[in-house]
Amino acid sequence: MKALMCAISGVFGLMTLVFTTDLRAELRVVASINPIHSLVSAVMDGVGTPDLIMSGAGSPHSYALRPSQARALQNADVIFWVGSELEQFLTKAITTTGQNARSVALIDSEGMARRPFREHHNDHADTEKEHDHKKHDHEGHKHEEHKHEEHGHEGHRHDSDTTDPHIWLDPMNAKVMVSAIADALSKADPSNADRYRDNAAHLSDRLDQLAADIADQIKEVKDQKYIVFHDAYQYFEAHFGMQSAGSITVNPDTMPGAEHLRHIKQKVAILGATCVFSEPQFKPKLVQLVVEGTAAKSSVLDPLGAHLSPGPEQYFQLMQDMASSMGGCLSAR
């Protein structure tokens, strides 16, 4: 009997050792923002779930890490983010807190379609008047001394070499990211490489179908003029053949002055914009003031999917919601 008990104890001890080893071997993955987290979640389906750093409607340009998020970075094996062009708050954290992890800046993925900021697309002239930048050199568009905080682009460097970081709004870029995610995960966790690659292949097919569905959904409104509060949508526009008439570069936390507001309203009227699109962080009162007295309607675009539940389906819902908002507002007469 004693021998039997020792044997049973040995078996349980071995099982505990194996179980503990498996737990320790589980890949710890962190993703920066909702759309990236969604794509990583889909590639990891059936293997694990990544941690999400930034949720809600905060700005990825000026986000502040919480202690629990810093710990997630510290314990991570792989960190997925767009890159320093977007999540500047992570630039230092990755090199310090997350220094033991493999950092994957998806904006640098092979095959990624990258677009420069549209300097002349924004309403700089009026903003310059409002903020008294008479001494600032705008003839050569030298913005080194200006952080654009009043434009709602905290952290963006608008020189000619800076890439617009909203890359996920082109579903073909999402396919590029999915491939890069699967490659990085396969290298970090070879035992599950086949699952990652199978998930990526399935996801790639779904992204093709998503792009086709959205193209069909907005085909009747592609030629309608519209204005956005934040020039974040050129990847979406380029893929689906749309073109906004301009953007209103305002800080979501600061109500524009009377002169700026008057100029915005004139711009909406002169362009004959069908719709003005804001984002969740902009106060409804500001949107109402912009469209008041014009023929334009208003709606909301949410490029981060701030109010959607995180997970594998979030990216698809985000893109479909954007298409629905555009289709609904631009078709209104």
Image (spheres, rainbow, N blue to C red):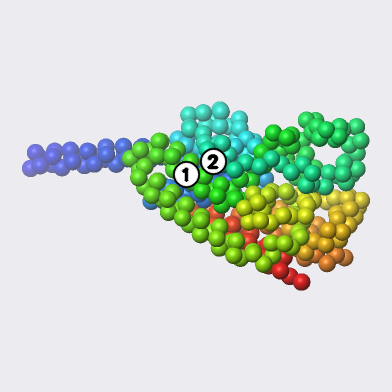
Residue 265 makes an appearance in the image: no
Q: Few, some or many C-alpha atoms within 10 Å of disc 1 (few <14, some 14-19, many ≥20)? A: many
User: Which residue in the structure is indicated by mark 1?
Assistant: 179
Q: Earlier in the sequence, mark 1 or mark 2?
A: 2
**Residue type, numbered disc 1:** Ser
To which quarter of the image does residue 2 belong? top left
Please rate how many residues cluster around mark 2, counting C-alpha atoms within 10 Å: few if below 14, some from 14 to 19, many from 20.
few
Q: Check whether the beta carbons of the residues at disc 1 and disc 2 lie within 8 A of each other.
A: yes
State the residue position of label 2. 111
At horizontal 74% and vertical 55% (from top left) the residue drawn is 244
Count of labels in the image? 2
In the rendered structure, the answer to whether residue 103 lies left or right of residue 265 reads: left
Q: CA distance from mark 1 to mark 2?
A: 10 Å
Q: Is residue 119 left or right of residue 53?
A: right
Which one is in front, 37 or 208? Answer: 208
297 horizontally vs 71: left or right: right
**Residue 172: % across, % down:** 55, 50
Q: Residue at 61% of width from left, 51% of height from top?
A: 169
Q: Quadrant of residue 270?
A: bottom right
Please provide percent x and percent y for residue 163.
66, 38
Name the element at disc 1: helix
Residue 247, disc:
none
Viewer-proximal residue among 295 and 208: 208
For residue 213, say whether it is visible: yes
Quarter of the image for residue 302 reads bottom right
Residue for point 13% across, 39% down? 7
Tell me the quadrant of the picture where the N terminus can be found: top left
Amino acid found under the numbered disc labelled 2: Gly
Question: What residue lies at 56% left-to-right and 28% top-to-bottom?
Answer: 95
- 45 relative position to 265: left or right: left
| Image coords of residue 156 (percent x, y) | 71, 38
Q: Say which of 214 and 25 sits in front.
A: 214
